[in-house]
Image (cartoon, rainbow, N blue to C red):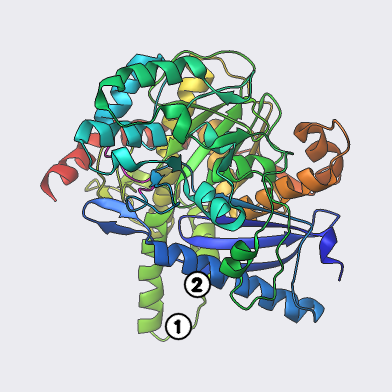
């Protein structure tokens, strides 16, 4: 096996760390994974540094095992690599590269005052999960670590730095640290100046530009695996240093790459632990609290609707049904259980028959909630069937996303020529796809590689750096080289499904006081 003709993507997702190795034809040939979960510690959603590094190593060993089983060889190198991770959050480092706080993930809704103040200062929406919001909230809170901050990064940027020694971010990930200027492919200088002026009297000894990672567009070389990094990744010493790295990206950017949604007027919906829609726009938008403006990995402007909660509540209910199956002696795998329950939802009433659920494990910015409580409720005359129950949870997982998308399509007249779905929500063929089509009232496509998701997208970005032609854009590379013969399915929901989702969403919005009461009293 010629491993120099491969590209490797490794992504730190919310519930799984996954590695995907692709060949020169851009096809996945091996993968590894590691399951993990965030913890709520002292009111902060986080992952420990031991869990981060241990998970990285376990995932890589699992990839090596898969390579050994399939090819009878030991994985010792790759043509190129790239790291991606859950977007943004807060990870400040000192001059030695050591974390100054626990990693604060995207899931935290603790930066409301900072996000509101910066949105007004910049004239640009700053979501709570963005790194700049976390930094400014720490300043407002007077946190003691601030004078010692040497670099501000994200999880993907941190791992990249540990492996290569370089403090850089892909521009898509960088755009959620601090707003960027798509024309200059760099952070917005005017906003940096405003921020520095706002904190000038704090006496930290640094200015914002000093601590921001270098922003790099897709296709550039972002460093090479060092000897120290190789041993961190693979303590056996078998994997060799020197592998070139693509700029580290966030899971939004890798999702765009994995679904060929990087050209203007295309979009994708990533649905897993969280869900988000990314629409590449072709005209400026007004400022909306529900809409984040980020970029593609190549730097084109993207309107993003991000929701903190998607499949976690579905997973909890599937686990419960799995317990019941075990209780009655039924032999069913977790994968089969998901398929059976998802398909059962297709038999439900289009509007879910009067059932309602809120999947809020954590706060939700689109609906202006700083905390969450999972809630299932029903009217006394509701049709309580298994099909309606499952359909309710599948529609609830998309409801908040739909509220944000309506702003884009109805208020901002953003056209969407193509919409792709990817992530765990779409793994059961046809079901999640049909539900999303009902939500957006338009066709939804799913590629055969949709289940590979972000790590596959990161591998493609590493491959783009390695294999692109001189001057070839990311958009053209994906169109002409990766997805020219891609197999995908396109599905359009029928009018009953579309009308049913609309009725469910109206009831969902009208019933939000139920969720607010649960937060207040539970």
In-front residue for pair 49/70: 49
Image location of residue 160, percent across then percent down: 57, 52
Up-down relation of residue 329 to residue 333 (above or below): below
The count of marks equals 2
- The residue pinned by badge 1 equals 330
Image location of residue 2, percent across then percent down: 87, 67
Q: Which residues are magenta?
A: 104-110
Q: Secondary structure at mark 2?
A: helix
Cβ–Cβ below 8 Å for labels 2 and 1?
Answer: no
Q: CA distance from mark 2 to mark 1?
A: 12 Å
Which of labels 2 and 1 is toward the front?
A: 2
Up-down relation of residue 63 to residue 306 (above or below): below
Q: Which mark is residue 334?
A: 2
In-front residue for pair 182/442: 182
The quarter of the picture where residue 51 lies is bottom left
Taking the image as shown, residue 275 lies to the left or right of residue 147, namely right
Q: Is residue 105 magenta?
A: yes
In-front residue for pair 15/237: 237
């Amino acid at each position: 096996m010629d491993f120099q003709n491969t590209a490797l993507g490794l992504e730190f997702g919310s519930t799984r760390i996954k590695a995907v190795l692709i060949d020169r034809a851009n096809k996945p040939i091996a993968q590894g994974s590691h399951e993990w979960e965030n913890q709520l510690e002292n009111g902060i959603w986080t992952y420990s540094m031991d869990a981060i590094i241990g998970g990285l190593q376990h995932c890589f060993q699992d990839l090596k095992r898969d390579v050994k089983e399939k090819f009878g060889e030991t994985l010792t190198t790759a043509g190129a690599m790239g790291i991606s991770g859950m977007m943004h959050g807060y990870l400040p480092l000192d001059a030695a590269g050591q974390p100054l706080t626990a990693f604060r993930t995207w899931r935290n809704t603790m930066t409301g005052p900072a996000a509101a103040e910066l949105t007004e200062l910049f004239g640009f929406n700053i979501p709570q999960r963005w790194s700049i919001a976390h930094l400014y909230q720490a300043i407002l809170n007077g946190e003691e670590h601030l004078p010692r901050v040497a670099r501000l990064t994200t999880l993907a940027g941190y791992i990249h730095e540990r492996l290569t020694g370089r403090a850089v971010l892909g521009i898509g990930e960088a755009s959620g640290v601090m707003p960027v200027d798509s024309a200059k492919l760099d952070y917005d200088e005017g906003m940096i100046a405003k921020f520095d002026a706002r904190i000038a009297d704090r006496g930290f000894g640094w200015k914002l530009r000093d601590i921001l990672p270098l922003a790099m567009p897709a296709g550039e070389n972002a460093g090479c695996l060092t000897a120290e990094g190789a041993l961190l990744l693979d303590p056996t010493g078998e994997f060799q240093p020197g592998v070139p790295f693509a700029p580290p990206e966030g899971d939004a950017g890798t999702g765009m790459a994995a679904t060929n949604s990087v050209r203007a007027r295309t979009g994708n919906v990533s649905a897993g632990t969280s869900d988000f829609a990314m629409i590449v726009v072709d005209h400026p938008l007004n400022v909306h609290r529900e809409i984040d403006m980020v970029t593609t990995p190549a730097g084109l402007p993207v309107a993003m609707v991000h929701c903190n909660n998607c499949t976690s509540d579905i997973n909890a209910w599937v686990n419960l049904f799995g317990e019941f199956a075990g209780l009655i002696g039924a032999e069913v795998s977790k994968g089969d259980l998901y398929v059976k329950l998802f398909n059962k939802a297709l038999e439900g009433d289009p509007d879910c028959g009067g059932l309602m659920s809120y999947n809020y494990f954590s706060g939700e910015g689109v609906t202006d909630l700083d905390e969450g409580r999972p809630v299932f409720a029903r009217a006394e005359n509701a049709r309580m069937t298994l099909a309606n129950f499952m359909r309710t949870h599948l529609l609830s997982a998309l409801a908040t996303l739909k509220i944000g998308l309506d702003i884009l399509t109805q208020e901002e007249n953003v056209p969407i020529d193509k919409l792709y779905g990817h992530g765990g929500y779409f793994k059961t063929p046809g079901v999640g796809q049909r539900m999303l089509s009902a939500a957006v009232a338009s066709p939804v496509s799913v590629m055969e590689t949709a289940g590979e998701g972000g790590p596959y997208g990161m591998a493609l970005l590493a491959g783009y750096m390695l294999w692109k032609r001189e001057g070839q854009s990311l958009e053209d590379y994906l169109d002409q080289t990766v997805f020219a013969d891609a197999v995908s399915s396109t599905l359009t929901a029928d009018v009953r499904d579309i009308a049913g989702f609309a009725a469910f969403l109206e009831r969902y919005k009208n019933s939000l006081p139920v969720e607010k009461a649960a937060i207040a009293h539970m």
